[in-house]
Image (cartoon, grey):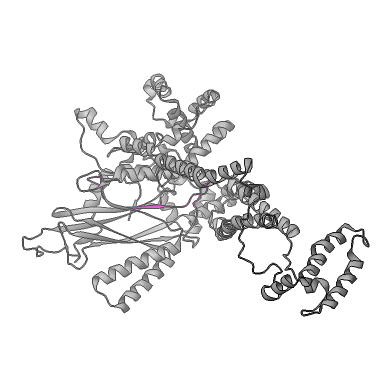
Amino acid sequence: MGASEENSALFPIFVLTIMALPLVPYTIVKILNTFSKKAMTIHCQCSVCSRSGKYRKSIFKRISNFSTCSNLTLVLLWIVMVVLIYYIKHTSHEVKVFEPFSILGLEHGASDSDIKKAYRRLSIQYHPDKNPDPEAHDYFVEYISKAYQALTDPVSRENFEKYGHPDGRQGLQMGIALPPFLLNIDGASGGILLLGIVGVCILLPLVLAVIYLSRSAKYTGNYVMHQTLSAYYYFMKPSLAPSKVLGVFIKAAEFMEIPVRRSDGEPLQKLFMLVRSELNLDLKNIRQEQAKFWKQHPALVKAELLIQAQLTRESKALTPALLRDFRRMLELSPRLLEELVKMALLPRTAQGHGWLRPAIGVVELSQNIIQAVPLSARKVAGGSSEGVAPFLQLPHFSEAIVKKIARKKVRTFQELRDMTLEDRVELLTQVAGLSSTETKDVEMVLEMMPSLTVDITCETEGEEGIQEGDVVTMHVWITLKRGSGLVAALPHAPYYPFFKEENFWLLLADPVSNDVWISQKVSFMDEAVAITAASKAIQELKEVSGASLKETNAAVREAVERVKSGSRLVMGKFQAPAEGNYNLTAFCLCDSWIGCDKKTNLKIKILKRSRAGTRTGALSEEGAGMEEGIDEEEQEEEDEYDDYESEYSEDEDEKDSKRNGVVPAAGAAAESSDDE
């Protein structure tokens, strides 16, 4: 019974230990991550972003950010731990070793007469006949009497002197830190113990395995449903116009799971009237077009209208229920758009190339959603090949202001960025009519916008020139600069209610054939990861080329310095195609900013492989089988594919099929970014 009580007392300590093992390190990591976040120092400081509430430091915002399921569970577990510590501290008692000599107040080796004298003295003080106190009675029976018996009995005293215990040699005792009723395997307690063992050892792992398998069967590693990827794969086309990308995007299974309530009917009708101009409806047959739109699946209608509410900044007209669905869609959008880009870049041709035109369209849709700019704003207008979309992402800008500054020969967004600070302030205050505070907001956003530089080379390692069939290594340094001096930053996105990191897509593609030869996602947020990746890549490259250790270390140090100064290294390999000259373009596309994309043109010359395996043919004048830049005539030919308006209105294959009744091959890709 005593052993059982001792094990029961250890049970709270056992529970406390099991809880503390994962809870303490998890809490430390969570606290460190909270303090290491730089979101409050790298976001836009303009008044529009401040009013959006996304970065507000009020106590209510902090409480709402803290009041998540994980945080509340963490607090609850710590409360349980504190209660256990308090309980253990006030209920635990030190295990006392039985020392008969100490109990009787004697030294070891005392004589029998001394033992009897001590016993009589303590009996007068603690004997029940002399002291009615119950505690005195217990102490006399449990300690004094047992100590006297142990020292007066010859066998007990000999055992105590030899083994330290009146009963002789003691064996090793082991216990289980469980409550007593679970240790009693008789009757109902035995059933409870059996159920506990079965539940913890069998049922719990089985339930966790079923949940994991069911979730993994439904979602991918990026938490996107397999059904969504299947739909994206099916509806993706090589000549998908940017205006048609939205129709593919809203077919995500995640959007289809958002309920369509009866109460949503009237608010969606009102929203439809607000965004009708953005739905690409034929105005000549507006009634038929509207009827056709509402005959779609209700979930598709709701999804498209809610996305248009973001693009047109009409979310204030939504009811609370629709606003929750609206926020849910925006929260899912970045990961779904990323998967849609990957689906466009999936190798579809015999050469293993993806499609350029839909990939650009998806990235542009991402830019518009983050910046809350209508897709129609990208149409060519006012002498600008990029439309008014880049201007509308600036605070306090509207189409009327864009028309005003266009009269002063500022027709493109890049021209506005290239102006001096004094000239731009004068333009915004005197021509655009902005106040000094509004002008300051514009300058803050312009300072946060990235400027990209792309330095790209393609070569065959260890060889001069590139022959058909060679494995070509692409080596790209992407450098990012901002007026604010930051490298990692959050974009100005006051109408997007969640934190959004900048991501860039590097695409090496042939715009004429619509083929993407190689692609990679690039981020400037984590410098440590970029340093590790660049160091490893440079080290492997130098080892393959046979460089010395000193040269390798110098190259690694140089790469690390470039990364710290705002550059990222991107490397990839592809197989050289057939002999010929190829005019390629390296697209560096940002998924968050409009008008910050970068294009770098290069010419690659592929030589014919000789039968003997030697390299023949003259190399290019640049000396590496590659020429950066193209002349003006070639640029004019490529500009034929820059008609964004035609691509916005119809797909290439739809126009040709209407004209000739056949479906042609993939057309040229849309190029919305600035030429180098």
502 drawn magenta: yes
- Range shown magenta: 490-515
Task: Indicate the position of residue 72 as horizontal and vertical percent values.
Answer: 63, 48
In which quadrant of the rendered image does the C terminus lie? bottom left
Q: Which of the two residues, 432 or 585, is positioned nearer the viewer here?
A: 585
Q: Which of the two residues, 59 or 511, is positioned nearer the viewer here?
A: 59
In which quadrant of the rendered image does the N terminus lie? bottom right
Q: Which of the two residues, 27 or 429, is positioned nearer the viewer here?
A: 27
Judge whether residue 444 can be spotted in this image: yes
Say above or below: 531 vs 599.
below
Determine the main secondary structure of the stretch shown in magenta: loop
Task: Indicate the position of residue 203 as horizontal and vertical percent values.
Answer: 50, 42
Judge whether residue 387 can be spotted in this image: no
**Residue shown at 49% from the left, 34% from the top:** 309
Say above or below: 508 vs 349.
below
**Residue shown at 29% from the left, 37% from the top:** 237
Quadrant housing residue 576 = bottom left
Q: Which of the two residues, 291 or 378, is positioned nearer the viewer here?
A: 291
Say above or below: 393 vs 260.
below
614 drawn magenta: no
For the image shown, how many numbered marks are present on the structure? 0
Q: Kindly give the residue lying farthest to the left in the view shown.
A: 611
Task: Indicate the position of residue 541 as horizontal and vertical percent values.
Answer: 28, 68
Q: Kindly give the residue lying farthest to the front in the view shown.
A: 154
Task: Indicate the position of residue 144 as horizontal and vertical percent values.
Answer: 82, 67
**Residue shown at 20% from the left, 68% from the top:** 462
In this rendering, would 568 be left or right of 577? Answer: right
In this rendering, would 220 be left or right of 469? Answer: right
**Residue shown at 36% from the left, 37% from the top:** 245
